[in-house]
Amino acid sequence: MTESQESPVRHFCAQLDAFVRASGQTRSYVVSRHPMSDSQVYAVLAGTVKTPPSFDRMVVPIVEICGGGPAAVAQWRTHHDTMVRVYELQKSLRRKGTAETSASTPEDTAAESPAARTPAAGTPDVATPDGETPGVETPGVGTPPAGAPGAAAPGADVPPAGAAPRPGAAPGSGAPPGFGVPPGFDVPPGYNRFASAEPRPARRPRRPLLVIAAIVAVLGVAAGGLTWALADRAGSGPDGPAAAPVAGGASTADPASPCTGTAPAGGGDLLDTPLPDEPGPLSRPWWTNEAAVVTMERFDTHSWAATVPESVGADPWALLAIRGCLPVTAGHRYRLDFTATASVGATLRARVQHNEWPYPESLMKNLTVGPDPQSFSYEFTGNLTSPTSELTFQLGGNPAMRVEVTDVVLTDLGA
């Protein structure tokens, strides 16, 4: 069971972050356009919040920034409502599990400390300091230090909400409509990340806690197709904001990634790597994260040209020209060659990077361009093995201009 399945809030945030990436946007772009504070938006997209984020103030702006219309907002409202119900049920069953533990059998009483079974009077489920922004996680909050009131005694084995019970536990009841325990739901024998290293006598199965784990697992299955459904929405044109399937992770074997092409053999040009057949920006040689603002006049495998308005923004990353699905290998040497021109003097930034947060780069170079064609050549070493790496040109922060990049080649020089 993954971490996102144990926490409905974290799972929801992971789905929302996947939706952002599927839309062709980046976290930094969403943060720059969102009305709430940068730290709050980053916390939600990174999945570090403990409580459900506000739907109207947090989720709706994210969906709209990524091009989602009323239908997408309605789908996310349903998903958010489901997450909140499971979150509240999780809290309720956690309290119920604590009460059952307090009324355990004499055998249970002999096997564990009273402090581990009975919380201190008035101890809340989740501690939130005064002034803390709801939904933003504070390190250490909700976990009393050893010896403090409400803290478990040393060696006590009190599973948290969402943890699976000891072997032998059976699925219970109490799930809301639509979130019953599925037939055949299986918890790995002995699964308990918080178990004491010292073996303890068997205890009575805690049915409510297993229900939590099962419900949240069902939530993950039920919500898993949401991002993919939203990602299939139609684009506004050849270079419109059509959504790509969620790109792969940091490993070289991500089954969800559409980037399945292999690099040309014998030290060829990575830009000749076959692109996905699925609809979306990743199927195009070049695309932009601001198709509604920038006119991509033309593009092919090794060149592109675009008209950029002045109102894009001051940050270089506010506007990107992107080539995705580049299979970079850690430790290999590469050479990037291209020629660039701009109708006015401008500063661009070339990056070869992984396409997942925090976008670790293998190459990052600033370059000054103007009306006269200028050639550039950079050698670098790949620092991450990933079939979903990308070559980006950051264009933001410049005056209105027409920019053209030609003769782009990314050569694998070998290890």
Image (cartoon, rainbow, N blue to C red):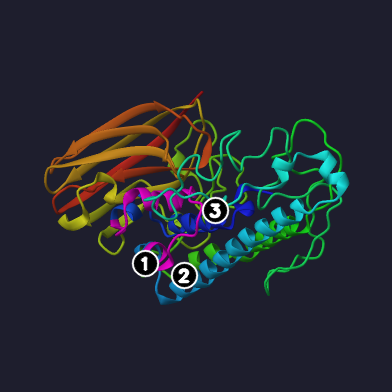
Rendered view: 308 above or below 174? above
Q: CA distance from mark 1 to mark 3?
A: 21 Å
Q: Which residues are magenta?
A: 33-60
Rendered view: 66 above or below 365? below
For image coordinates 66% across by 56% down, the residue present is: 94
Q: CA distance from mark 1 to mark 2?
A: 14 Å
Task: Determine the image quadrant of residue 208.
Answer: bottom right
Give the numbered dot on residue 64.
1
Question: Which element carries disc 1, helix, strand or loop?
Answer: helix
The residue indicated by pointer 2 is 233
The residue indicated by pointer 3 is 10
Q: Amino acid at mark 1?
A: Glu
Residue 97, image x, y percentages: 72, 56
Foreground label between 1 and 3: 3
Q: Does residue 224 appear in the picture of this structure?
A: no
Q: Residues within 10 Å of mark 1 (few under 14, many from 20)?
A: some
Q: Amino acid at mark 3?
A: Arg
- Seen from the viewer's position, the closer of residues 45 and 92 is 92
For image coordinates 58% across by 61% down, the residue present is: 87
Name which of mark 2 and mark 3 comes first in the sequence: 3
